[in-house]
Amino acid sequence: MTILRCTRCSAIYERNPPQFQCEKCGNLLEYTYDFEEAGNFEFTGPFGFWRYRQLLPEVGTLATLGEGGTPLHKAERLAEEMRLKVLYLKDETRNPTNSFRDRCAALMVSNALDLKHDNVICASNGNLGASLAAYCAKSGLICHVIVPKIVDMGKLAQMLIYDAIIEEHGEAVDDALKRARSLQNETGWYQATAELNPLAIESQKTIAFEIAEQFGVPDWFIVSMGSGGTTYSIWKGFKELKTLGKIDDLPRMVGVQARGCAPIVKAHEENKPEPTVVQKPVTHALAILVGNPLNGILALQALKESRGIAISVPDAEIIAAEQEIARLEGIFAEPASSATIAGLKKLAQQNIITQEDKVVCLITGSGLKATDVLQSLTKKRKTAILGLELSTKGKILRILSRKDAYGYGLWKKLGKTMTRGAIYQHLNELARKGIVITYEKSGRKYFKITARGKQILRSIDELKTLL
C-alpha cells in the first residue's frame, strides 16, 4: 500500500491529488510503501519504466511513449583519461524526448488521466516542459508551461511543436514556480511541476532500479543538482531496493552544481540542513540554474545519509567536459549532465574517487536541446579557423607555401619573436599531423608543406570569404 507522508512530522495525506507540502509543518511530502505487503516479488515485463510499476504509486491509465530502459554506457576511453577502471554513463538522452524527465511525464500524465483532468500545468526551464508537452499531446490533454526568460531554445522548440501553451514569467525557474502555483490555485489544473508534485521523485527513482539490474551498485553515483530532487530520487531508489533485499550495498552520492549557482553545495560544506539561497544565480547550464532549490533539503539528506559529497565546478570546466564526453564516448550531453564528468574529474584528481572505485554518472539530457552551447561551439570553431591564420603555425604554413625553409631561416622570417626551440616544437607538431615533411639538403634539415597542408590553407581562404 502507498502512503503520502510528511518527511518531518509524518502526517499522512490522501494519495490523490498529489500534494507536495505538509499543511501542519510546511515540510515536503513523499510517497512511502508497505514493503511487507509487497512481499517477495520479481520485476516483470519489458526492460523499461513500467517494469517497476509495483514500486510506484498506483495508476490505472498508462501514458507512455516507451520511456525508460535506457542504456548504461561503459565509458572506457573516458575512464582511461581519468585513470579509472570502471566508469559508466546512464544515458537518459535515449528517452522519447531525449531527457530523464520523460519518466516524470509518464507517471504524472497517467495520474492526471486517472483524476479526469483536461489541463496540466508546470513550471520548467526546459526538459520537463518538453516531456509534458509530448505526453499531453499523446494523451489529448492541454499542456500549459511557464518558462523563465532564460531557457534553452531547443527545449522551447519541443514545447512549441508539441502544441503546448507557453507563458514566460520571471528571470529564472524560481519565479516561474510561483506563477505555476498561482495558476493551479486559480484554475484547478493538474500540477505537474517536478518540485510541486511528489510523483516526480517516485518516477526518477526507477533510474536506480534499472542500474541495479544492469550493473549492480556502484561505489559512487554522480548527479548534477538543480532543485535537488534527482539526487534524492536516486538515493531513495537504491534504499528501497536494499529494504526489499534486492541489493546488499548502497552507493555514495555526489551532487554537482555550477560554481555560479551552488546553494546546495554551499549548505553541505557549511553543514547546514537547508540550502543557502543564491539571489542572482549564474550558469550556462540552464537545467541546473536554480537559486532556491525546493528539494534541496532532500538532496542534503541523501548526501548525508550516503556519506556523499557536494561539489561545484566552473562553467568552463562543464563545457570542456561536454566536448570530452562527445569526443571520447560519442554521447552529446547537455551542460547540466556534463557537470557530472567535470565533478568526477576534480574528485579523481584529488584522489577522493580512486582508481579502484566503480562510478556511474547520470546523463540527464541531450546537448541538442542546448542551442546556446551549439552556437557557442560553432562560433568557437569559426574563431579557431581565423585564429589559425594569425597563429604561429598559420604563419609557418604561409611561408612554406611559398618556399621550403629550414628552422633558423623560419625563425628569422617570423621576426625572432620567440625562441628557436618553440619554432621547432611547432614544426614537429605539424610534421606529426602530416602537414609538413622534412628532408636533408647541404647538411641542413628543410621543411616542406604537404598537399594536405596546402589544402588546409585553401580551406582557410575559402572560409574567410564566408565569415
Image (cartoon, rainbow, N blue to C red):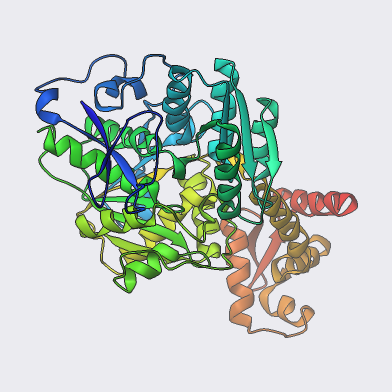
Q: Is residue 459 left or right of residue 270?
A: right
Above or below — where is 160 with respect to 382?
above
Q: Is residue 398 left or right of residue 432?
A: right
Residue 308 appears anywhere in the view: yes
Closer to us: 246 or 339: 246
Q: Quadrant of residue 120?
A: top right
Q: Is residue 113 left or right of residue 51?
A: right
Residue 270 horizontal/vertical position (percent):
32, 74
Relative to residue 91, is residue 163 depicted above or below? above
Residue located farthest toward the front when viewing the structure as drawn: 24
In the image, residue 190 sits, relative to residue 308, either above or below, namely above
Q: Give the x, y percent position of residue 338.
A: 47, 51
Number of numbered discs visible in the structure rendering: 0
Residue 126 position in % (x across, y down): 59, 42
Q: 377 or 274, which lies in front?
A: 274
Q: Nearer the viewer, residue 149 or 27?
A: 27
Residue 101 appears at what percent x and percent y? 47, 35
Quadrant housing residue 52: top left
Q: Nearer the viewer, residue 178 or 402?
A: 178
Quadrant where the N terminus lies?
top left
Q: Residue at 36% across / 24% down in the picture?
A: 49
Q: Is residue 124 visible?
A: no
> Is residue 425 found left or right of 242 in the rendered image?
right
